[in-house]
Image (cartoon, grey):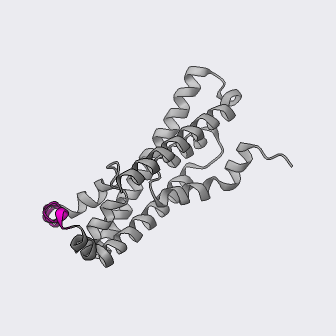
Amino acid sequence: MDVSPSQLLEQYGYLAVFAGSLLEGETILLLAGFAVHQGYLAVGLVVACGVCGGTLGDMIFFLIGRRYGSALLTRFPRFAPRIERFNSLLRRYHGPAIILVRFLYGLRIAGPMAIGAGGISAWRFLFFNVLGAALWAGLLTGVGYLFGHTLDLMMGDLKRYEEAAFGVLAACALCLGFWRWRRNRRAG
């Protein structure tokens, strides 16, 4: 039985958006926005899956930071001055910090952990986390949609090239993920 990439996308696209949004998620939301432009996925469901996955992932890392943050600080005392400076800013500007940390490259996992260790209440974090996730998922899905629209304007009938375009985008996403994995492995 031959299954086309478009059939896989229609069957598992929303699950992929949710799972991809648990960790980093930017690439998967851009690809999903492109799929929305092509008519394979619905924008509301893509954004909802991105918000749910992004919120859940950040909440898990927040709770890890809440539970193990002080142990990590004692294990790595050289970070103490920077963490204290971050915590003082967090106490002052907690709402914008929680929202913006989602948009800062490389802080998607470490940010919620640091916020969890900083003593912000879980309910306050959840409120601003959901707000940030909604902005993040909507913005990135929209950028992916605009990318598809731009390609459509430049190339005319994009349907002829969509499997190749999805293949190239997926290959780029895999390369980016591998690059991030290697960089993090070397650093840690």
Q: Residue furthest right?
A: 1
Question: Residue at horizontal 52%, vertical 38%?
Answer: 145
Question: Residue at horizontal 23%, vertical 67%?
Answer: 76
Question: Residue at horizontal 44%, vertical 54%?
Answer: 24
Q: Is residue 85 magenta?
A: yes
Residue stretch in magenta = 77-92
Q: Is residue 83 visible?
A: no
Q: Is residue 27 left or right of residue 127?
A: right
The percent coordinates of residue 171 (x first, y second) are 58, 39
The percent coordinates of residue 48 (x first, y second) are 51, 58
Q: Residue furthest bottom?
A: 67
Q: Quadrant of residue 156?
A: top right
Q: Is residue 162 left or right of residue 115?
A: right
Q: Is residue 2 magenta?
A: no
Q: Quadrant of residue 95?
A: bottom left
- Quadrant where the C terminus sits is bottom left
Q: Please, is residue 10 above or below residue 163 in the view?
A: below
The percent coordinates of residue 183 (x first, y second) are 40, 48
Question: Residue at horizontal 45%, vertical 52%?
Answer: 137
